Image: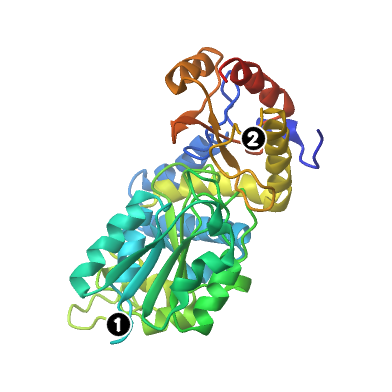
Amino acid sequence: MTTALDLGAARAAFLMPDGPYFLSHSIGLQPQAAAKAIERQFLAPWQGAAVDVWDHWLAAVDKFKAALATVIGAAAGDICPQTNISSALTKIVFSLPERARRRKIVLTEDDFPTVGFVAAQARRLGYDVLLLPGGPRLADIDAWSPAFHDDVQLVIATHVFSNTSVKSPAAEIARRAHERGVFSVLDIAQSAGAVPIDLSAWRPDFAVGTSVKYLCGGPGACFLWAEEDTAARCSPIDVGWFSHEAPFEFDIRNFRYARGAQRYWGGTPSVAPFAVAAAGLEIISRFGVDAIFEHNQALLSVLIGALPQGSLLSHGRAGERGSAAVIKVKNPAGASRALAQAGIRHDQRMGGVRLSTHLYDGPEDVSRLLDVLIREM
């Protein structure tokens, strides 16, 4: 198996573990440049508390936004830093304009639980929550039809589902939602950095994501993307001085929403996580998501093709999957111990072992993985 990706160069960009690393769906590896990035962009300006320290810190956040924009097909100005996806979703749900006949929020049974927890809180605003059935059907746009009814206010669509690895038709969901007057949010936590995304072309109303997984940026550097016209219609209630049109105006009696996505920022922002995350984004951008996707999918095809029929608990169809797979084994706990003893990083889900491929994984890693897995099946 060969791909266009330079595996040696990819591995040189990260702090590599001793054994194969198939855990990027949970935590991407640390970039070699991460420590220098936090020293240069966060700690160094802080030394002696220079009067312009915030200029340096906000420049670090801007660098993150610019790097992320190239990876997700967006304009940097439409990206707003966030602490986590739960907070970002909450800000979105509670900012939407009141529309009397639209009282439903639609999501799916396969969404990450935090999505459901946030949606449930919307009941205090009078919304009903509709959970679409999960499974491979979610790769088909027809499975999403209830999300486009006239009584729906918002559809939250996961691009790649964390357990099943189903890749939803995100662009078509956004298009149909827009046609029917339904607000849309894309959750790109499990796709950003590993699956091609083009928010400027797809034009959902919002997107949310995190740097901790395939973007290899660590926790705390999450983001909210908002379509400019949509943001202008929305009024977040979780605001702060960085949600203000002029944050340094300091007039307590005069709050004016910032333009676009920045109105969702809130109070004093974190800086260090975004300085670190930019280092990961620069690597992803350098290799290119298209090349990374091709590489990851080729490795997955080798893995899936070598397994006995019926071994997949997740969705394995090419073109409809993300970068992860859940493999059925006789004894998940025993198989997990065997993989750990072989130095293979992984985790467990759905009664099997979950694994994912990324740009620093190679064919020899898949071979080592299969040597252990086949014995456990």
Residue 364, given in percent of the width and then of the height, sits at 72, 23
Whole-percent x, y for residue 10 in the image:
69, 36
- The amino acid sitting under disc 1 is Arg
Q: Position of residue 98 (x, y in %)?
A: 29, 84
- Above or below — where is 154 with respect to 188? below
Q: Which mark is residue 13?
A: 2
Relative to residue 288, is residue 197 drawn left or right? left
Q: Is residue 110 left or right of residue 236?
A: right
- Residue 277 placed where, x, y %? 49, 47
Is 374 on the left-hand or right-hand side of 228?
Answer: right
Q: Residue at x 44, y 59 (%)?
A: 223
Residue extending furthest toward the front? 310
User: Looking at the image, is 321 positioned above or below residue 227?
Assistant: above
Name the colouring of the figure: rainbow
Q: Secondary structure at mark 2?
A: loop
Residue located at (55% from left, 77% from top): 176
Residue on which the image places disc 1: 256
The image shows a total of numbered marks equal to 2
C-alpha distance separating marks 1 and 2: 43 Å
How crowded is the residue under tag 1: few (<14 C-alpha within 10 Å), some, or many (20+)? Answer: few
Camera-nearest residue between 60 and 94: 94
In this view, the residue in front, 189 or 219, is: 189
Instruction: Inspect the image, locate mark 2, and give the three-letter code of the amino acid beneath it.
Output: Ala
Disc nearer the start of the sequence (1/2): 2
| Residue 29, picture quadrant | top right
Q: Quadrant of the N terminus?
A: top right
Residue 122 visible in rendering: yes
Tag 1's secondary structure?
loop
Quarter of the figure with residue 257: bottom left
